[in-house]
Image: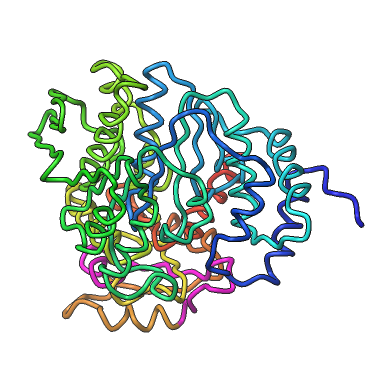
Amino acid sequence: MSPLPTTLPDWLALLESRHAETHIDMGLDRVRAVKERLQLAFSCPVIMVAGTNGKGSTCAMLESVLLQSGYRVGLYIKPHFLDFNERARINGEMASDDVLIAAFNAVEAARGEIDLTYFEFTTLAIAHLLSTSEIDVAILEVGLGGRLDAVNVIDADVSIVTSIDIDHTAYLGDTREKIGFEKAGIFRAGKTAICSDPVPPQSLIDHATSIGADLRLLGRDFNYQGDQQQWSFAGRTGRRNSLAYPALRGANQLLNASAALAALEALRMTLPCGAQETRAGLALVELPGRFQVLAGRPTQVLDVAHNPHAAATLAQNLGNMGFHRFTYAVFGIMDDKDIDAVIAPMASVIDHWCVTRLDSPRSANPAALADKITELKPAGAKAGDFSVTTFDSPADAYANALSRVEENDRIVVFGSFYTVAGVMAARKSSLH
């Protein structure tokens, strides 16, 4: 038997090489068996968050409010942009290589003959790390779906489903009803189940009812209202008035913030959060790549939007930003996404497309993307008003956009975590 890796990059390389031989095996029996061997259990409240879009934002708001309230918070969030360590946060800080290596070693020792995918292995490792850390609350972001996601071997005290839209149809089904059922799989009997989708699928409501979960729906059990300056939240047991708008920008963030506050309301006896701490948490929350507007000019926006729902929201948010002469897009997307429905809402807000290949075998072909986009060229667009150019990497596409953009223009980077991560890495290396 070969010795185990001693560095985090070597561990991740080993897991990726094993993972290449394992397709996505939908089912939790293997993960549950290793969880039992690890004796993985949380002695603090667990909040689990699933949804098509808005999961990361909701997790970040929960973390921020709870940290402001003085609690020790463990967070599992994904994917990462630059460093794997971003996936595990303890008290607002990324986990160190050393504690992650120790967690990987623990899972490897426990799994024995059981094969685990990269995602299953790393999920168990981070859950083990959080469960053995001194924390007051754990926040766990679900990956794909809910019912069969590796995170779902853990029982949450509060489960949140943010939004339900069409994505990952090969695994989750091709209707909101089918996908809603998969997401509702994280709900537990007798525990709080929250859905902040304004139009929750009946399948989600039926599942929550059939298992006896305490379902809280936006518009029925909690809601929000706001004006230009501030907003307020009303829940089952009380109101929170004159709240600061979340520091995360964009049209859907009050839905996500309301889900977070509904979860905190459900946990108010064990994890009370004061009005001032709640305001501060929302005002200070940070999350890269979610309608992230970079400082300086020209305006630059990073957004991981990669499905139709997220792209429509991004287009709406860009439309609310005020005048920009030209908008340049750095765009790359996975081939298994609903590409036409992602491009359609963005076509009206983008003038110059820098289309890139992504560092993944699932990447869509830039030339094929360029053909789709060219068909949407506005009628009567003059030379110089519209262009589509293809590139082999997000860094090259971004460099091209930067070379052409003027001060009153803007750049929007979107289509995939890989697109945003590629541009983040290029920006980081240019600073050194």
Name the foreground residue: 215 vs 369. Answer: 215
> Residue 176 is drawn in which quadrant?
bottom left
- Specify whether residue 65 is painted magenta: no
Residue 424 screen position, x and y as percent: 51, 48
Depth order, front residue of 183/18: 183
The vertical placement of 176 against 7, above or below, is below
Horizontal relation, residue 330 to residue 247: left or right: right
**Residue at left offset 52%, top offset 25%:** 135
Q: Residue at x 27, y 62 (%)?
A: 309
Q: Quadrant of residue 327?
A: bottom left
Q: Residue at x 10, y 35 (%)?
A: 226
Q: Which residues are magenta?
A: 343-367
Residue 147 x %, y %: 43, 59
Q: Residue at x 34, y 34 (%)?
A: 61
Picture quarter with the C terminus:
top right
Residue 75 relative to residue 130: left or right: left
Relative to residue 377, is residue 1 depicted above or below?
above
Q: Position of residue 54 (x, y in %)?
A: 32, 49
Front position in the image: 121 or 369:
121
